[in-house]
Image: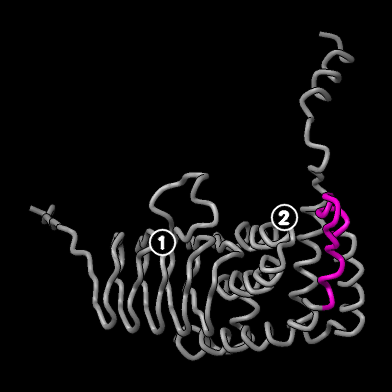
Amino acid sequence: MSQSEVIEKIKAQKKLPNLKFSIKEKTEAFTKNLFYTLFDEETPVEENIKKLGKDFEELADLVCWKPDTPCRDIWQDYLDMLPGILKKLNKDAEAISKNDPAANSIEEVILSYPGFFAIAIYRFSHEFYKFGLPLVPRLMTECAHGLTGTDINPGAQIGTPFFIDHATGVVIGETAVIEDNVKIYQGVTLGALYVDRNLKNIKRHPTIEKNVTIYANATILGGETTIGANSIIGGNVWLTASVPKNSMVSHTPQINIKNTSK
């Protein structure tokens, strides 16, 4: 094939006129700027809020390509929510600092804990998700996913405070409900029993009630699955059914130890 033929074939396959990678790049920049605005002492709040507003207008124009979707109009409502979001995140950071013996300060938690960063970006994106803003909420949480290995869908409902320890490999699905004061460890999955497009708009991820601790690599599946308040779910547990409150659930593997010195 000639070069011109190759070019024409590529053009013929590019059938998505609204697929613009600038949306992803602008969302990543917006997310970082929002995080700095709320937490960084040296970032001027007033100046950055104005910049965030302009950046959001550009994003809204890119993602709201369908007619009669005035995405720009939600910015002021979102702005009004930022103090409340920051209040929740300060409670999250405080809970992590109080509960993790490895944490030396709240500053350390905010600057270096991947679990806190993932929670922060989730809380930023969740309000946009509730507004019905296309693409941006998911792209925001993917920023955190790529940096931390923690995949929280912006549609999940998560109480305060929330603590993810170590964070890597955590997956929290779109319709999951997590109540206040829940702690989870690395590798935990709150997922669906199976994937089917017909399940859209149906609750397919579990509910975790207050004061539950879920240890590493536990898998909890299903929209009707509820983990009762004050329960402890041990590491590597696989659950597809509900657990009453005040439960202790454990998985006991068979471990064989052989002395190889003889």
Q: Is residue 172 magenta?
A: no
Q: Name the image quarter holding residue 241.
A: bottom left
Q: Is residue 187 visible?
A: no
Residue at the spot of label 2: 135
Answer with left or right where residue 1 lies relative to residue 233. Answer: right
The chief SS type of the magenta part is helix
Answer with left or right where residue 203 lies relative to residue 91. Answer: left
Query: Is the residue marked by circle 1 packed among few (<14), some (14-19), or many (20+) residues within 10 Å?
Result: many
Residue at the spot of label 1: 223
Q: Amino acid at mark 2?
A: Leu
Q: Amino acid at mark 1?
A: Gly
Seen at 85% across and 13% down, the residue is 5
Seen at 66% across and 58% down, the residue is 138
Q: Residue furthest top?
A: 1
Give x and y (percent) for residue 246: 27, 83
Distance from Cα at disc 1 to Cα at disc 2 = 24 Å
Q: Is residue 61 magenta?
A: yes
The range drawn in magenta is 59-76
Q: Name the image quarter holding residue 56.
A: bottom right
Answer with left or right where residue 91 lies relative to residue 27. Answer: left
Give x and y (percent) for residue 152: 56, 63
Which element type, helix, strand or loop, lies under badge 1? loop
Q: Is residue 138 above or below residue 247?
A: above
Q: Nearer the viewer, residue 35 or 97?
A: 35
Seen at 49% across and 74% down, the residue is 164
Answer with left or right where residue 8 lies relative to residue 145. Answer: right
Q: Name the image quarter holding residue 18.
A: top right
Identify the colour scheme used: one colour
